[in-house]
Amino acid sequence: MRRALTILAASTLLLSACAQPPVSATAGPSTAPASPVTAGTLFAKGCLQQLPSFSGTPAALSTEPVTQRESSGTYYHNSQNLSLKVVQTSEGPYCSVVFGTTGNSDQVINAFGTAASQAAPGLQANLILDFVPGPDNTTYYNARVNAQ
């Protein structure tokens, strides 16, 4: 019985290492405002918890409602105006989430930060958070963390 459990555990680890979200040539952003809590949670799971290389990002997002765009590698939320991408640069990789939502910026930033902190408790990382107003009372937020 012990041997069967060991094999099952090993096969489960192997499957989770190979897991990744679906890929589509047409994946793109939704027009529905993003939840800052959802954005913060995805940022923590896909970026913060995958530091420093972000190599675990596909597996981390495999159970989330996202689809990866084939041509860009960007992960788009299936029903919210929210995307996440790992970018490789000559200075090292970074991971970024962009989301569009309405509402008070202070409340949005607070909800995003609280959700990210709860999803990655105890993790310390320097991140950059910018936002710009867009059309239709939508504000676009971008949170980014560089490999450390």
Image: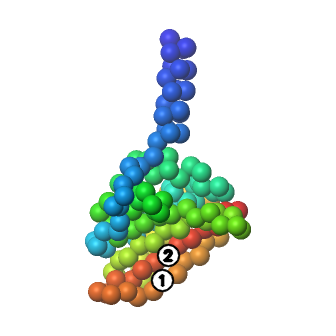
Q: Nearer the viewer, residue 115 or 100?
A: 100
Query: Callout 2: few (<14), some (14-19), or many (20+) C-alpha neighbours within 10 Å?
Result: some
Q: Is residue 37 visible?
A: no
Which residue was labeled with disc 1?
Answer: 131
- The crowding category of the residue bearing disc 1, from other C-alpha atoms within 10 Å (few below 14, some 14 to 19, many at least 20), is some
Residue 137: x and y in percent read: 31, 87
Specify whether residue 96 is in view. Answer: yes
Kindly check if marks 2 and 1 are in contact, taking CB atoms under 8 A apart as contact.
yes
In the rendered view, would you say 16 is above or below 10? below
| Residue 38 image position (x, y, % from top left) | 39, 63
Residue 81: which quarter of the image?
bottom left
- Which sits in the foreground, 36 or 91? 91
Residue denoted by label 2:
142
The span from disc 2 to disc 1 (Cα, nearest Å) is 6 Å
**Whether residue 24 is situated above or below residue 126 in the rendered picture:** above
Q: Residue at x 28, y 73 (%)?
A: 31
Residue at 43% in and 57% down: 70
Q: Which mark is residue 34?
A: none
Q: Residue at x 45, y 46 (%)?
A: 20
Callout 1, which amino acid? Answer: Phe
Secondary element under disc 1, as helix, strand or loop, is strand
Residue type highlighted by circle 2: Asn
- Front position in the image: 14 or 102: 14
Residue 133 image position (x, y, % from top left): 40, 88
Q: Position of residue 11 (x, y in %)?
A: 51, 27
Quarter containing the C terminus: bottom right
Dot placed on the residue nearer the N-terminal end, 2 or 1:
1
Rendered residue at 38%/49% (across/down): 22
Side (left or right) of 64 relative to 145? left
Q: Label 2, secondary structure: give it.
A: strand
